[in-house]
Image (cartoon, rainbow, N blue to C red):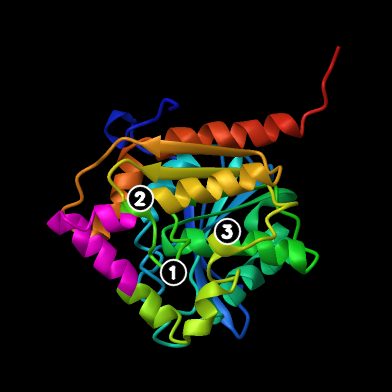
């Protein structure tokens, strides 16, 4: 397990951290988005991380991951971070959300100048339902010929609509974790009202039999998370398909309410793991010198 960074140990945000609300193009219209970047000068950043929020496909928005993304941008000054919304299941169920997510990636490639991004390195990321969308975006980008992705960051991802893993079943005994498991079940009922969609690889990447030729992955699970096993199983499947993958099980953190998971990810090891992952992608792009 790698070392991490706790929010409590961090200094105040850099005075150069800039945050801007904007809109990006979705599959059927504009989507609300928020851009985070440390801009001490006018140079463009080489890495753009596009992040999708949690909320079980049925709720959530830009504010949910705001603190986490402020720290992410502040600690990775060579990186621009863009949080994008997507169509929630109450408005339109699967595949509306994943089509929005992929469309947002296509939009950023066409609008680099607006984002202060050089266009060199695009990373897709998300937490829980947003991590499902991030994982699916890598499949869609491969299948549809772009955009090219340098990496994927999946934080406590929802990858198994069947809710069949041992960690999902075994952790239903504690009240707080039972609430998380129940919330996952309700989320999938809203997102995938058609039962046949639950085995579609763009809804359940864990069930996909085609996981080759995907970008390097960082997958973060948590010791006491009902989603832990599906995250780690997906990591194992990616590795078996030749995808460079790092899977880290973070220490347990108390979850007093199901909506506290973004805070959990921020305060625990996620930020340090992500910083190391991004640095590794940057090193991989740097030619060796004698």
Mark 1 residue crowding within 10 angstroms, few (<14) / some (14–19) / many (20+): many
- In front here: 30 or 260? 260
**SS at mark 1?**
loop
Q: Position of residue 43 (x, y in %)?
A: 69, 42
Dot placed on the residue nearer the N-terminal end, 3 or 1: 3
The answer to whether residue 151 is above or below residue 53 is above
**SS at mark 3?**
helix
Mark sitting on residue 161: 1
- In front here: 81 or 123? 123
Dot placed on the residue nearer the N-terminal end, 2 or 3: 2
Dot placed on the residue nearer the N-terminal end, 1 or 2: 2
Instruction: State the residue position of label 2.
Output: 67
Quadrant location of the C terminus in the rendered image: top right
Q: Position of residue 45 (x, y in %)?
A: 66, 44
Q: Position of residue 172 (x, y in %)?
A: 21, 58
Q: Residue at x 71, y 58 (%)?
A: 113
Q: Residue at x 42, y 25 (%)?
A: 3
**SS at mark 2?**
helix
- Write down the region rendered in magenta: 168-185
């Amino acid at each position: 397990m790698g070392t991490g960074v706790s929010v409590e140990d961090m200094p105040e945000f850099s005075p150069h951290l800039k945050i801007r609300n904007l809109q990006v193009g979705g599959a059927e219209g504009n989507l609300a988005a928020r851009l985070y970047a440390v801009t001490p000068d006018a140079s463009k950043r080489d890495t753009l991380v596009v992040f999708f929020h949690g909320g079980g496909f049925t709720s959530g928005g830009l504010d949910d991951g705001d603190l986490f993304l402020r720290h992410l941008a502040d600690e990775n000054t060579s990186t621009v971070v863009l949080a994008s919304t997507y169509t929630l299941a109450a408005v339109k169920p699967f595949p509306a959300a994943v089509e929005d997510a992929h469309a947002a990636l296509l939009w950023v490639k066409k609008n680099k100048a607006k984002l202060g991004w050089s266009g060199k390195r695009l990373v897709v990321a998300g937490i829980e339902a947003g991590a499902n969308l991030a994982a699916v975006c890598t499949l869609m980008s491969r299948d549809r010929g772009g955009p090219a992705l340098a990496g994927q960051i999946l934080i406590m991802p929802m990858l198994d609509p069947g809710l069949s893993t041992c960690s999902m079943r075994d952790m239903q005994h504690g009240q707080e974790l039972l609430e998380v498991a129940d919330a996952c079940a309700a989320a999938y009922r809203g997102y995938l009202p058609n039962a046949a969609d639950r085995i579609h690889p763009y809804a359940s990447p864990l069930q996909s039999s085609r996981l080759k030729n995907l970008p390097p992955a960082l997958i973060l699970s948590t010791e006491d998370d009902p989603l832990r096993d599906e995250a780690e199983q997906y990591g194992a499947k990616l590795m078996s398909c030749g995808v460079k993958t790092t899977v880290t099980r973070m220490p347990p953190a108390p979850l007093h309410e199901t909506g506290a998971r973004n805070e959990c990810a921020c305060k625990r090891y996620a930020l340090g793991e992500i910083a190391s992952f991004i640095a590794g992608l940057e090193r991989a792009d740097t030619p060796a010198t004698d």
